[in-house]
Image (spheres, coloured by chain):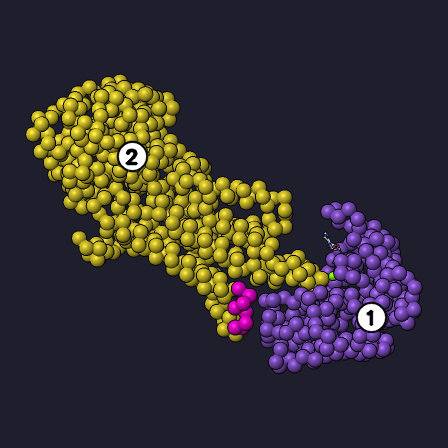
Amino acid sequence: MSFWTFLQQNRNEMLTLVLQHLNLVLISTSIAVVIGIPTGILLTRKQTLRNPVLGIANVMQTIPSLALFGFLIPLPFIGGIGARTAIVALVLYALLPIIRNTVTGILGVDRNVREAAVAMGMTDRQILWQVELPLAMSVILTGVRVAVVICVGVATIASAVGAGGLGVYIFRGLRDVGNTNLLLAGALPAALMALAADFSLGLLEQRFSVEAKTEKKRASILNKLVLAVIALVLAGGAYGTWRAARSRTHSLAGAARVVVGSKDFTESVLLAEIVGQMLEARGVTVERQFELGGNLPHDALVAGRIDLYPEYTGTAYTAILRHPSITDPRAVYELVKREYAEKFHVEVSPPLGFENTFAILVRGTEARRLKLKTISDAALHARGWRAGFGQDFMSRADGYPGFSKAYGLKFADQPREMDLSLTYIALASNKVDLIAGNSTEGRIAAMDLVQLEDDRRYFPPYEAVYLGRKDSLARVPVLGEVLVKLGNAITTEEMRQLNYEVDANKRGPVEVVREWTKLKGF
Amino acid sequence: MTGVDNNPLVEFRDVSYSVPSLSSPIISDLDFTVEQGEILVLLGESGCGKTTTLKLVNRVLTPTSGQVLIEGKPTTEWDPIRLRRRTGYVIQDAGLFPHFTVERNVGLVPSLEGWESTRVKERVIELLSLVGLDADRFAQRFPRELSGGQRQRVGVARALAADPPLLLLDEPFGALDPLRRASLQREFGELTRRLHKSAIFVTHDLREALRLGSRIALVHAGRLALIETPENFLNSNEEHARAYLETLQLRDDEEGFTGGNR
Ligand SMILES: Nc1ncnc2c1ncn2[C@@H]1O[C@H](COP(=O)(O)OP(=O)(O)O)[C@@H](O)[C@H]1O
Ligand SMILES: [Mg+2]
């Protein structure tokens, strides 16, 4: 599909994402301006506060955005899932350049000029408004410009907390490697937005520089225009915040309402969508907070920002409960169920019937030629092979380090560390000879890849389950019914097929799930 | 400053001023008065504390010890804003606001005082012509579009704007070439006499002091070395005064200058 047809087909969604992105940036920079400039002014008055406050703002900027989002989710009032959290994070990032430039701008006003203002009998307030702010304005605007550009960038990560924006396309595009259209459709408007903001605020800045004052008549009209634009932007930001706040309170009014979360990959979205549609069919209002990054779904669940999300027992057991991995599926399931109930008041649903474990894959042609069935079979040939693994597999304890030891694997070279999605393509095109994929990956059959049996039972079980808050289950009884119904209802082949429909055939998850639930009679 | 009482307009009583970062005071035991209608010249080399002394008058600074009295009332008891608006200040190197037009610079204090805009405008035109600038040509310019001499004139006009009884002038003609300087000195002398202004005029130039001052206060290292009328100053035997007079002698010999023109 060409980029152009992609744009035409996704016009509406794209417009929504662009507007969401713009809204995030406008609201957060407006808030940052409203907080940052007065703070900056205060710091020029209170010298003792200056270094501590600038120091804190500096530290804020060094926190990686995903970590900051994770930190914000459990907080009351400002935290949670969605636009509000993203805006709080963006404001925190935008504050430093605005505060710092306000301080340097005002302190940078010529000493003689300031002394003249004092000697003329101007009050402190008059000096601020008539002398310091006008003379510092171009420096302050530089700070605002930097803040806007930072916000346009960081807002792409906001999709990880369910705030939408162009990051939705960028993250989808990163996961779906063949699809450059998605990446372009996300990155291009974001880049244009940053450039436009940089350019227009740069013009505005020049208007306010003292040199520009020589073109007085023109300048005064333009200054008014520019002020009008700023006022509009601020008003727009305020209106957006108000609307967001209103729509939030509105949706909270619904009685049987469930917030369903998902992780940021296709399978998780599909599983969440399945529950969502089944609940809706039973008259429950569903809010979708899909594609949350990293461990954010867990944080959000524990904090009560979402009611349930799909998870894998092995991930819960090792990554969240931090136990060393064991291989007995029943033991893992029971332990997870017990500890989640005790620690988080979270219920673990019956297993859905399939596992999404690491699948050690080789090309079908190779498997048939060498009669490979198990990983142990492959270990005999591995010395002449190259391997490619995703970052996740390379770094986690139950990944490559333990795996290679368990099977005594040695490859020709140090395994290539690359994006997980890319490893499938690399394997199919003979660039590598062995990879660790996901057992439910839709492309396994389509690409003629063969999964080798984990004959030494090294990998811990990754059974798919839903995790739901106990209080949500009590509040919405039908939720428990749906989860029981889904117990043992999805086979590995079915899951692969569903993933394939979305990843390879580029169909929407909503549609794919609708067909499937109908087929199953749910 | 109405002159009905007998208090001098400005009185320094044993004034010292020091800053924590310097071991010795910038100003030590300064003691002098400025009478109604008088132009007192503060003469001294660069760094001797002249600007500091001026700032003590309009309470930009307050003395560390001693008192500065304006019309008999210590500056610390004045409302600083009121005091400053009734004291015209010509700042060293003009100190104009770079983002204001000439008109706004000159009309600043009247505007702050709440004058109507038409009255401010008239006053600006009047003042600009008083300092020899054509309002039509200069009112809408910004300071960076003026020559050094024009800027100094605007600085003087700004100080005169609200008709203050007292003027403080900090080397107002310091940055000018000798010809411009001489003509501005002449104009300024006439102006103050005509307007009956009292002033403290800071300079490091003895000729300027002799030309303009009704009395000359010689400051050395923050202390008052001598305070005399120009005639008596010329005949003084005080060592710092002699040092100044010798430079005058030297230049007179070169240039054939024959004493003060007052
Ligand atoms: N706030 C200050 N901190 C430190 N030193 C100062 C301060 N103000 C003035 N000085 C010093 O005091 C001396 C007198 O300054 P000033 O009154 O400006 O001298 P003048 O106007 O006679 O050239 C100078 O040496 C100057 O560096
Ligand atoms: Mg000085």
Left-right relation of B61 to A276: right
Q: Which label number is shown at residue A391?
A: 2
Say which amino acid is labelled 1: Leu
Left-right relation of B41 to A463: right
For ligand 2, which image quadrant applies? Answer: bottom right
Q: Residue at the location (33% across, 21% down)?
A: A323
Q: Main secondary structure of the magenta part?
A: helix
In the image, residue A264 above or below residue B185: above
For residue B122, which quarter of the picture?
A: bottom right
Badge 2: residue crowd in 10 Å (few <14, some 14–19, many ≥20): some
Which chain is painted in yellow?
A
Q: Which residue is mark 1?
A: B250
Label 2: which secondary element? helix
Q: Residue B2 at x, y = what percent? A: 85, 69
Q: Nearer the viewer, mark 2 or mark 1?
A: 1
Residue A316 visible in the current orientation: no
Which chain is painted in purple?
B
Q: Which span of residues is magenta-colored?
A: A209-216
